[in-house]
Image (cartoon, grey):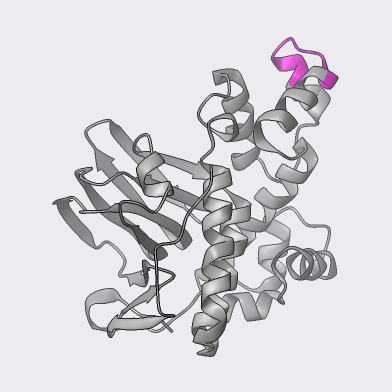
């Protein structure tokens, strides 16, 4: 799926908490713990990435529980309501107008776990926090490409149910308590077949997906604010503090302490902030 950018004159602020970049409206929001939003709909297709915390989103098709690393896609006109968790949530949202390519191709309300979109979103957040708006267009384009890849049918929509269940198990068991062989045996499958089908559907190996699931689990702990780096490393399934720091730096390009500061913007009136 390709994403076309409408004409634009460079990044600009539309009002204090929203930025227009590459023809898209970009907004970073911090929602208070327990906050609720009544049922509403957006005029354009909306794409959101949860950086920290979590929320429930209810629509006519059901309910989605979203936490750090979740990518939400809502086609224009999708009525939905939100309830934010005990830690609130930090969410980066894009409004994709008609003619943008992605907005026209969005088939339905959906959610994906996408480490690539999360990592690209972190890059956008770093640019926003630095105030270097000249670098924002490239960062936004990279993020939208990652979003597009995550939303492709084979990446999430057309995978068989059993394969989605394997992915869900890896999300809740990132510490590697069960090997690939054990997971395959529980499904009466050959490990090689499982590994091949998983890579074809989700574009990474089971081991790589599990490592990234550990990073997201640790990021959720760090963003809570009261969790030490050592505890985040231990509960995330890393061998030790040094191993944790190396993996975060390699995958996200910054130290865990910097990631924690990045994911804790000040709460402004109305719950929205760009820094």
> Can you name the residue that lies furthest to the bottom here?
131
Residue 98 in the image: state x and y as whole percent. Answer: 30, 51
Residue plotted at (69% across, 51% down): 212
Residue plotted at (53% across, 31% down): 153
Above-or-below relation of 4 to 258: above
| Along the viewing direction, whichever of 47 and 185 lies nearer the viewer | 47
The magenta region covers: 184-192
| Along the viewing direction, whichever of 143 and 141 lies nearer the viewer | 141
Above-or-below relation of 192 to 220: above
Residue plotted at (65% across, 37% down): 170
Q: Is residue 220 visible?
A: no
Residue 251 in the image: state x and y as whole percent. Answer: 74, 63
Q: Quadrant of residue 195?
A: top right
Quadrant where the C terminus is found in the figure:
bottom left
> Can you name the residue that lies furthest to the top here?
188
Tell whether 244 sits left or right of 121. Answer: right
Q: Quadrant of residue 199?
A: top right
Residue plotted at (68% across, 45% down): 174
Above-or-below relation of 137 to 199: below
Tell whether 230 sits left or right of 226. Answer: right
Tally the marks. Answer: 0
Residue 218 in the image: state x and y as whole percent. Answer: 63, 60
Q: Quadrant of residue 30?
A: bottom left
Q: Is residue 230 magenta?
A: no
Above-or-below relation of 4 to 198: below
């Amino acid at each position: 799926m390709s994403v076309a950018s409408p004409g634009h004159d460079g990044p600009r602020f539309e009002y204090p908490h929203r930025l227009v970049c590459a023809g898209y409206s970009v907004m970073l929001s911090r929602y208070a713990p327990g906050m609720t939003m009544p049922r509403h709909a957006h005029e354009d297709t909306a794409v959101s990435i949860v950086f920290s915390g979590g929320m429930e989103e209810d629509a006519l098709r059901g309910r989605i529980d979203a936490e750090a690393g979740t990518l939400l896609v809502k086609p224009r006109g999708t009525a939905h309501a939100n309830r934010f968790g005990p830690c609130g949530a930090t969410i980066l949202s894009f409004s994709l107008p008609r003619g943008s390519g992605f907005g026209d191709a969005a088939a339905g309300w959906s959610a994906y776990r996408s480490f690539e979109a999360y990592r690209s979103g972190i890059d956008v957040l770093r640019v926003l926090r630095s105030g270097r708006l000249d670098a924002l267009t490239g960062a936004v384009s990279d993020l939208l490409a990652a979003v597009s890849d995550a939303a492709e049918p084979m990446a999430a929509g057309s995978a068989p149910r059993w394969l989605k269940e394997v992915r869900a198990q890896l999300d809740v068991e990132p510490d590697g308590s069960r090997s690939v062989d054990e997971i395959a045996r529980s499904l009466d499958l050959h490990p090689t077949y499982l590994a091949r089908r998983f890579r074809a559907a989700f574009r990474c190996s089971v081991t790589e997906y599990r490592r990234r699931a550990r990073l997201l689990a640790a990021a959720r702990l760090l963003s809570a604010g009261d969790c030490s780096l050592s505890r985040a490393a231990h509960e995330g399934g890393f061998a030790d503090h040094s191993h944790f720091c190396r993996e975060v730096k390699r995958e996200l390009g910054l130290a865990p302490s910097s990631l924690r500061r990045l994911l804790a913007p000040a709460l402004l009136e109305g719950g929205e902030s760009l820094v």
